[in-house]
Amino acid sequence: MTAVIEARNLSRWYGNVLGISEITLDIEPGITALLGPNGAGKSTFMKIMTGQLKANIGQVRIFGQPVWNNRHIFRRIGFCPESDAFYEELNGLEFLTGLLSLYGYDREECLTRANRALELVELRDVRERPIRSYSRGMRQRIKIAQTIAHDPEVLILDEPLSGLDPLGKRRIIRLIKEFRDAGKTVVVSSHVLPEVEALTSEIVLIHNGKILARGDIHFIRELLDSHPHMIRIKSPQYRELARLMAAEDYVLNITFEPEAQAVVFETHHRDRFFNRLNELVLDPGLDLEEITSPDDNLQAVFDYLVER
Amino acid sequence: MREEIGRVFSLYFFLGKKSGRARTFFLLSSAAVLMALIIRTYRLAGHWTEDGQVVFQNFLMVFFLQFLIVLLGLFYGSSIVVEELDNRTLPYLTSRPVRRAAIILGKYLAYLSLATVMLVFAVLVSYLILNLDSEFRWKDLLTVLRYSVILWLGLAAYLSFFSFLGTWLKKPILVGLAFGFGWESVIQYFPGTTQKLSVAHYLKSLLPQYASSSGKLGFLFIRLEPTSPSVAVIVLAAIILVFLALACLIFTYKEYLFED
């Protein structure tokens, strides 16, 4: 398949701070997710892709054309920025028709397209309410509506699921999949693995401005599963729990926190660990007050992958 | 390009009308009407005996020429990019199929139109309040028209200069305040050619009867060594065009980053 987006040796600095470094990537039609912790360089990459920023080195091309200051390409791209920013004094319909008018559509066409986009994101009923009165989920959806209203071939969505409730997330995920089914190229960024898993199997891992790995979800999952996980359990019987778990070969390390009546386990096999934990809750009937994962975030996983 | 400017103009004229800033500036412009009412009341009570035309000219000089057009130009011009950065709405504009220069020109024209409406309203109403009596002739309105055109030229020049600052500087408002109410207020009273380095000098040169201005505020005209009206118009037009071109050039090639 021909690449729609081609990035070649892209590097970008903000003064002394590195944004992205030597990113070379081809993106084809379908959904591609950029996964990485906050500050990894996802947004910088997206801003370069949409002509908001210039690369210090390298170039990005969409449909074979450079993006920076190329207004013709913007007719074919829809960009959903990360920031929760709007012309707050406008209502949803005015916001969309105003932005659509920048494409040169007449009033009638603007209204038709705006209403269609509002319908797709299920905001038609509130289109005449000021945006400042919208909930977080509605604001996220109106942002997506402005991305799709001109029917672009490429959608670049920076953290489109952030701040949404589960129902809102499901709606947006369904919508994004519909764009994929319509043959569009969708690039989505996220720092939450389960969100990305729900969207696509094509993942690009970004960390510290570099592409760490690229592959389908199974490949990424394997990488992540090899990361030793920390699990903290608070229980009045924390010493007994530690004694029973110490016998398991997948438990790598145990640390006690006597003041909090807690114990922290380090394991390579989360699934086996939790299966055993379930058994211990049933027999001998250990009482567990709280289970948390101190490093259960993408940053810890990425740090591990970088050190490996 | 013209069509692209038109698209941006329509959007920002609409946005501008709905903004709280427009209401604030409209109220501020209306302060001139209020002042005119107070002066008229004083005149009716016999406390102010000067001719309405003279009062208006002094009034115009102080409030409109040295305050309102500078303020409107400063706040609309310097916000041309900064408001998009502060509100983080810039990507909505720069990811659309319009030239960056068209964004600046469209916004400039939208803001100039809004400010013109406020200005003309305040000038016309305050003139009528001060001069509408039994001796009023409709052809006196030609004087208002002349004043309005001069003020409009000043507004367009200040707006152009401050738009240039707005595209160039991160915090244009401080530099703008220093220029608008520092440099402009002082330099116009310097003798010789130095005063020609202010926009206000060319505007004053266009005002009728500047030299014979006799009211209580006539001291504002001292030291004016006027430029001929035709040269003054050419210089003002050049200021508008040069600074607009620079603003477009900067916005086309400069990257704008959000604070974080």
Image (cartoon, rainbow, N blue to C red):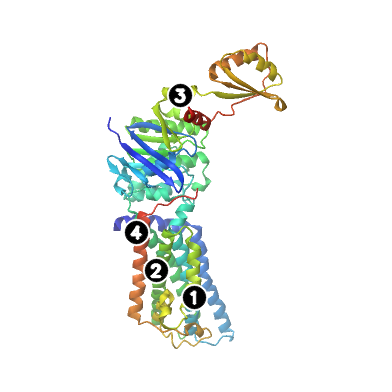
Residue A188 x, y percent position in the rendering: 41, 35
Amino acid type of disc 2?
Ala
Q: Do residues under tags 3 and 2 come within 8 Å of each other at their CB atoms?
A: no
Q: Do residues under tags 1 and 2 come within 8 Å of each other at their CB atoms?
A: no
- Quadrant where the N terminus of chain B is found in the figure: bottom left
According to the image, label 3 marks what residue?
A223
Q: Nearer the viewer, residue A118 or B214?
A: B214
Q: Nearer the viewer, residue A136 or A192?
A: A192
According to the image, label 1 marks what residue?
B185
Answer whether residue A127 is visible to the viewer in this image.
no
Q: Which one is in front in this view, the residue at disc 4 or the one at disc 2?
A: 4
As helix, strand or loop, the secondary structure at mark 4 comes to helix
Q: Mark 2 or mark 4, which is nearer the start of the sequence? A: 2
Do callouts 3 and 2 point to residues on the same chain? Answer: no
Disc 3 is attached to a residue of which chain? Answer: A
Q: Residue furthest top?
A: A283
Amino acid type of disc 1?
Ser
Occupied quadrant, residue A123: top left
Q: Mark 2 or mark 1, which is nearer the start of the sequence? A: 2
* Mark linked to residue B156: 2
